[in-house]
């Protein structure tokens, strides 16, 4: 398989000996990455869970339920006598081309996807966020690149950053200029904004970037004065839909 492309190997046809039934939770979710001023990260990740409940049209016994996550990890399988649920935790974020299926005692197998057109990508969007209160300067927010096994790229990057110039002691209460620079993985400034905040004022800068470049992004935030800063900043790398072919 060429990275970022769908394999051209043949797909399976639905097996008429098996009536497939699959239940899925956590198929399309958002992973959360809380950052601090030193770019330390606390991750909140969500598992995918597949429940297998197939029926045999020929009275055969099922011998294996399996799942291939599509993130370069090994195939997972269970004996149907031991359970009917497989779970998996994806790290990072992105779209992952998984496969899953069942095998019966006669050697019949039902495998999804049946064709390239119904290949469902497991979706993991990402929210990166950073909160600060009563600090002398704003912090930068660093957005990690997607899992290297993710196919395609995020569909949208959204920035929402609120900076407040809070009241403090008279000697430190003064107006300041806040400048936001959104920098792509190649080091280019993609969007920029400067806002003057008087004491007691705050401002929210919000922008969207369609089809953002794959890789790590940075939001660099500067204050022209050392004042009393409150900050709430979030960047979302958004994926949607199930079908990816590039």
Image (tube, helix red, strand yellow):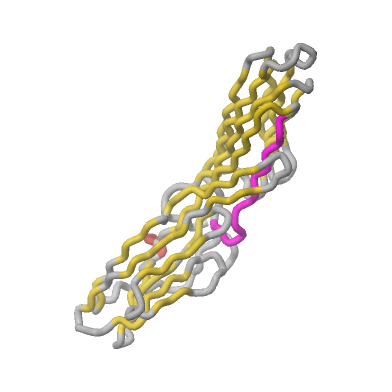
Picture coordinates of residue 158, whole percent (x, y) = 56, 36
Query: Residue 21 versus residue 134: which sits nearer the camera?
Result: 134
Q: Looking at the image, which residue is at 58% across and 34% down?
A: 159
Residue 82 relative to residue 97: left or right:
left
Q: Looking at the image, which residue is at 68% across and 36% down?
A: 219
Residue 128 relative to residue 110: left or right:
right
Q: Main secondary structure of the magenta part?
A: loop
Query: In this picture, which residue range is highlighted in magenta?
Result: 138-151
Task: Please say whether residue 104 is one of the residues in the magenta stretch.
Answer: no
- Residue furthest out toward the bottom: 106
Picture coordinates of residue 233, whole percent (x, y) = 61, 33
Q: Give the answer, above or below, for where 18 lies relative to 133.
A: below
Query: Residue 67 versus residue 232: which sits nearer the camera?
Result: 232
- Residue furthest out toward the front: 169
Q: Give the answer, above or below, for where 119 lies relative to 13.
A: above
Q: Give the answer, above or below, for where 80 lies relative to 208.
A: below
Picture coordinates of residue 80, whole percent (x, y) = 33, 78
Query: Residue 85 versus residue 153: which sits nearer the camera?
Result: 85
Q: Give the answer, above or below, for where 223 lies relative to 41.
A: above
Q: Looking at the image, which residue is at 55% across and 41% down?
A: 236
Q: Looking at the image, which residue is at 39% across and 60% down?
A: 117
Picture coordinates of residue 199, whole percent (x, y) = 68, 13
């Amino acid at each position: 398989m060429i990275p970022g492309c769908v394999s051209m190997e043949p797909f399976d046809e639905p097996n008429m000996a098996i009536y497939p039934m699959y239940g899925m939770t956590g198929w399309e979710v958002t992973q959360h990455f809380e950052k601090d001023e030193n770019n330390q990260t606390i991750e909140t990740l969500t598992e995918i869970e597949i429940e297998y409940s197939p029926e045999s049209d020929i009275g055969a016994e099922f011998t294996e339920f399996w799942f291939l996550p599509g993130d370069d990890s090994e195939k997972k399988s269970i004996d149907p006598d031991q359970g009917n649920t497989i779970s998996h935790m994806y790290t990072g974020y992105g779209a992952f081309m998984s496969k899953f299926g069942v095998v019966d005692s006669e050697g019949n197998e039902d495998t999804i996807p049946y064709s390239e057109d119904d290949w469902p990508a497991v979706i993991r969007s990402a929210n990166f966020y950073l909160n600060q209160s009563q600090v002398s300067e704003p912090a930068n927010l660093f957005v990690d690149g997607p899992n290297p096994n993710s196919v395609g790229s995020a569909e949208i990057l959204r920035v929402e950053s609120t900076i407040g110039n809070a009241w403090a002691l008279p000697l430190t209460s003064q107006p300041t200029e806040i400048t936001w620079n959104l920098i792509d993985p190649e080091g280019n400034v993609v969007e920029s904004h400067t806002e003057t905040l008087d004491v007691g004022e705050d401002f929210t800068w919000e922008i969207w970037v369609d089809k953002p470049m794959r890789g790590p992004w940075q939001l660099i935030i500067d204050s022209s004065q050392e004042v009393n800063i409150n900050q709430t900043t979030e960047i979302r790398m958004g994926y949607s839909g199930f079908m990816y072919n590039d």
